[in-house]
Image (cartoon, helix red, strand yellow):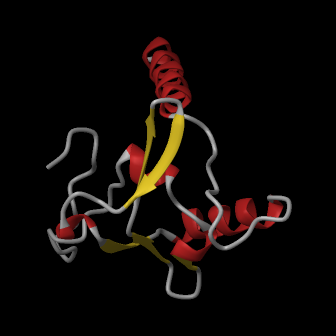
Amino acid sequence: MRQGCPRPARKTSARSPRCIREGELLALTPGDSDFKKRTVTISKSYQRIKSRDVVAHPKTAKSNRVIQMPVFLCEEKEDYIKSLYAVEPSDRIFTVAKSYLHREMADKLDMERKRA
């Protein structure tokens, strides 16, 4: 089990975890989501190599998977994609870098620690 991921529910198969890695998140496109079935297909990963954005297939076949989205997340993601200007099905929907993601997550953790 990856650190930071919730334990899968008993009905959830170990082959389809509810977690998504940073590179997989940053590689998502509108075409990866099926809002009627509430699923997202994980089939690629984002990396930054020598100042270039690289979206590639995962290293292992097991990394290709379809995961179920909770209703609230499905609705928020659908609204977010609709708010993007002239987005194509193959465009990345999160165009930030991993460093930005790390900084935002660290800030959120710091705020939560201060509240406790």
Residue drawn at x 47%, y 48% is 54
- How many numbered circles does the render carry? 0
Note whether 45 is above or below 70 in the view shown.
Answer: above
Residue drawn at x 56%, y 27% is 100
Pick the residue in front: 59 or 7.
Answer: 59
Instruction: Where is residue 20? Give x, y as percent.
Output: 36, 54
Residue drawn at x 54%, y 71% is 71
Which residue is farthest right? 85
Pick the residue in front: 9 or 37.
Answer: 37
Q: Is residue 21 left or right of residue 92?
A: left
Residue drawn at x 65%, y 69% is 75
Instruction: Where is residue 97? Give x, y as percent.
Output: 55, 34
Residue 73 in which image quadrant: bottom right
Q: Is residue 66 left or right of residue 85?
A: left
Instruction: Where is residue 30? Give x, y as percent.
Output: 63, 70
Note whether 83 is above or below 21 in the view shown.
Answer: below
Note whether 3 is above or below 74 in the view shown.
Answer: above
Note whether 34 is above or below 21 in the view shown.
Answer: below
Say which quadrant the C terminus sits in: top left
Which residue is farthest bottom? 36
Which residue is farthest top? 114
Pick the residue in front: 40 or 56.
Answer: 56
